[in-house]
Amino acid sequence: MIKLISDIDQEEAEEDVISREPTFQAPKEVSIPLYQRLFYSKLYNSVKWSSLLDNNLLLNIVTFGTYSKLVRACCNEIDMHSKVLQLGGTFGNQLAELADSVGYYGHLDVMDVNGTQLSRLEGKYETPYPQMHFIRANAEDGIEGEYDAVVCFMLLHELPIASKIKVVENALHAIKENGKVIFIDYSQPNYWHPLRYVVRMFNRLYQPFAEKLWDRGIDTFAKDNLDYIWHRTRYFGGMYQKVVAVKRPKMFEEAPKYSDFL
């Protein structure tokens, strides 16, 4: 049978429409990393232990009275009505203080890989802080969108070295021009610190990746660290640190490529 030209054109048009229809993609499954399952599963997967640690007084005790100071130091870096991302959920009132610093008309995303912790945070903050939103994702896999500030509050010491590098790189690439990344974490105490060797022994037993922050500055985890201005402040005899990386403004516009003129 001979097909008419109009029939052939109609069939080709239908095939073209079908080929351009979006195909369904199942949501990407977020799995808990191996290091968290090995060293932190009892803490982060247990509602009982999480509820116990979700206490400002206890957190100040285990941080030798430094927790509240670290929270204030972090929030002082945040501008009102800005768009902020925090990598990793936290205990205590740190997220509440951060949301207050962002303000009602700001935007605060909280990203965590652990579903139990995200559910706990949603139940705690969703109603009183409508500007707070929750994302289940692994920061090692990349960050979508641009932010005025990205916060890593006591996160890096839990990550293996390869994961530290990925998270620092992704955080730096997620900020706008003149934006900043705020890191709050452990640091190497002064040599005279009376708790220096006690903390070192505790880390080697329970936080095996924390000591890498004693050996290296956080800026050394970034590939293009010269593209940022780095500021470091130490607390409690150097045991804790705040590192702020501010993205340098571009001095010159990028020259157009030769292919743009073709």
Image (cartoon, rainbow, N blue to C red):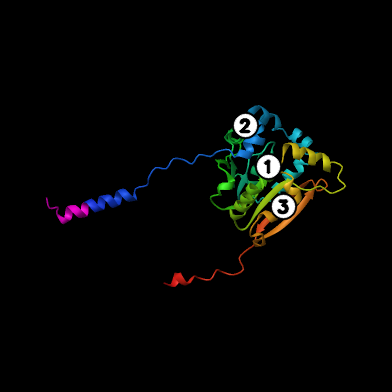
Query: Quarter-wise, where is residue 109 in the image?
Result: top right
Q: Residue at x 73, y 50 (%)?
A: 242
Residue that protrudes farthest toward the left in the picture: 1
Residue sitting nearer the eye, 154 or 105: 154
Residue 102 in the image: state x and y as whole percent.
63, 47
Screen quadrant of the C terminus? bottom left
Q: Locate residue 203 relative to residue 109 in the image: left or right.
A: right
The part of the chain drawn in magenta is 1-10
Where is residue 179? Give x, y as percent.
63, 56
Main structural element of the magenta stretch: helix, strand or loop?
Answer: helix
Give whichever of 172, 79 is nearer the camera.
172
Whether residue 173 is in magenta: the answer is no
Of residue 21 and residue 58, the one placed in the foreground of this image is: 21
Task: Name the residue that disc number 3 marks.
Answer: 243
Which x, y percent locates residue 154? 70, 43
> For the residue carrying disc 2, how many other residues have a C-alpha within 10 Å: few (<14), some (14-19), or many (20+)?
some
Residue designated by label 2: 45
* Position in image of residue 141 (x %, y %): 55, 47
Which amino acid type corresponds to the residue marked 3 in the rendered image?
Val
Label drawn at residue 158 = 1
Measured in 3D between alpha carbons, the distance from the residue under mark 3 to the one under mark 1, in whole angstroms, is 17 Å
Secondary structure category for the residue under label 1: helix
Are the residues at dot 2 and dot 3 in contact (C-beta closer than 8 Å)? no
Q: Residues within 10 Å of mark 3 (few under 14, many from 20)?
A: many
Q: Is residue 149 above or below residue 200?
A: below
Q: Is residue 7 magenta?
A: yes
Amino acid type for the residue under numbered disc 1: Glu
Cβ atoms at labels 3 and 1 below 8 Å apart: no
Can you tell which quarter of the image residue 38 is in? top right
